[in-house]
Image (cartoon, grey):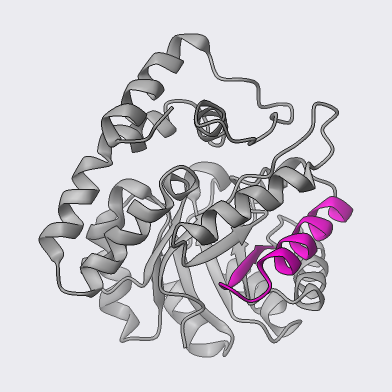
Amino acid sequence: MSVFTGAGVAIVTPFHEDYSINFEAFAELIEYQIANSTDAIIVMGTTGESATTSIEEHIEAIRFCVKTVNKRVPVVAGTGSNATDTAIHLSKEAEKCGADGLLVVSPYYNKATQNGLFHHFKAIADSVKLPIILYNVPSRTGCNILPETVVRLCREVENIVGVKEASGNISQVVKLMALADGKVDLYSGNDDQIVPLLSMGGKGVISVLSNVAPKETHDICAKFFAGDVEGSCRLQRKAVELCEALFCEVNPIPVKKALQLMGMDGGTLRMPLTEMDEANVPRLEKAMKDFGIRI
């Protein structure tokens, strides 16, 4: 059973100017997502700036999200770390908080071998009962989870069920699904590649775009699954300019600016991230307007 099917939002974490979490704004963002057909909420991932939150804040954000969502959609908690023990601790705490699944990124900086990756993820999975989605994003971690390793983990470890694939390497994804034999739930980690990965048997997307266009991102998946492939492709093509604008600077800088332009409180960014370069704002504004987002 998949953790979710469709478009899950990699939700931002709104911070006050003093960098504390703005839970009132966080609740509003969660309610906006649910009201606009988001299929799942992924909390404390890359877009949620998990790299600059303390362990205590990380757990509190997960607990708050689970409580606020109240089982209306699945909540997937980001609990990865480059230290296996830390990832185990976060995963256990997320399970106690009531999360429906975990998103576990490959260890960054350490650059583990494929054997090291296998044992890292297995140790985390063995510590909890929740289903786990691996997160492969080598552009950030410097470490690529090869298809053979993903398939081995999904076959040999009962509660490792899939992967968020953000390598951008379509050939790697095709190989993965050729080897998977139905054992791997595939989620796109790139908003400009949702339909290509769905066409390979993907279950959906874990999306930055969904922060500002939740209904449309949901519809890309829903139309595809309903057999309206052309309608799904049309929405995917329409989103290209906006996807590019949302990644013209490192995520989540542009998406927090986009929320601000929409009159929503995405909050400030934590250092070392800084506010969006003013030279890039017109591009973002244009892309949002062209997509049909009111600002």
> Can residue 190 be seen from the camera position used here?
yes
- Range of magenta residues: 55-78
Q: Is residue 111 found inside the magenta-colored segment of the image?
A: no
Quadrant in the rendering for residue 128: bottom right
Q: Residue at coordinates 29% horizontally, 74% vertically from top-left? A: 177
Q: Residue furthest right?
A: 56
Residue 21 drawn at (x, y percent): 80, 42
Whether residue 210 is situated above or below residue 266 in the rendered picture: below
| Quarter of the image where the C terminus is located | top left
Q: Is residue 20 left or right of residue 172?
A: right
Q: Residue 76 in magenta?
A: yes
Question: Residue 17, how many percent across, how many down?
Answer: 80, 26
163 vs 117, left or right, is left
- Asked if one can make out residue 105 in the rendered structure from this viewpoint, the answer is no
**How many labels sit on residues?**
0
| Foreground of the two, 131 or 238 | 238
22 vs 115: above or below: above
| Predominant SS along the magenta part | helix
Q: Nearer the viewer, residue 84 or 160?
A: 160
Classify 103 as above or below 101.
above
Q: Position of residue 141 (x, y in %)?
A: 57, 47
Up the image or down, 19 lies above or below 206; here it is above
Residue at x 10%, y 59% (from the top left corner): 230
The residue drawn where x is 77% and y is 56% is 61
Q: Residue at x 78, y 48 (%)?
A: 23
Q: Position of residue 64 (x, y in %)?
A: 78, 61
State which quadrant residue 96 falls in. bottom right
Identity of the residue furthest to the left in this view: 230
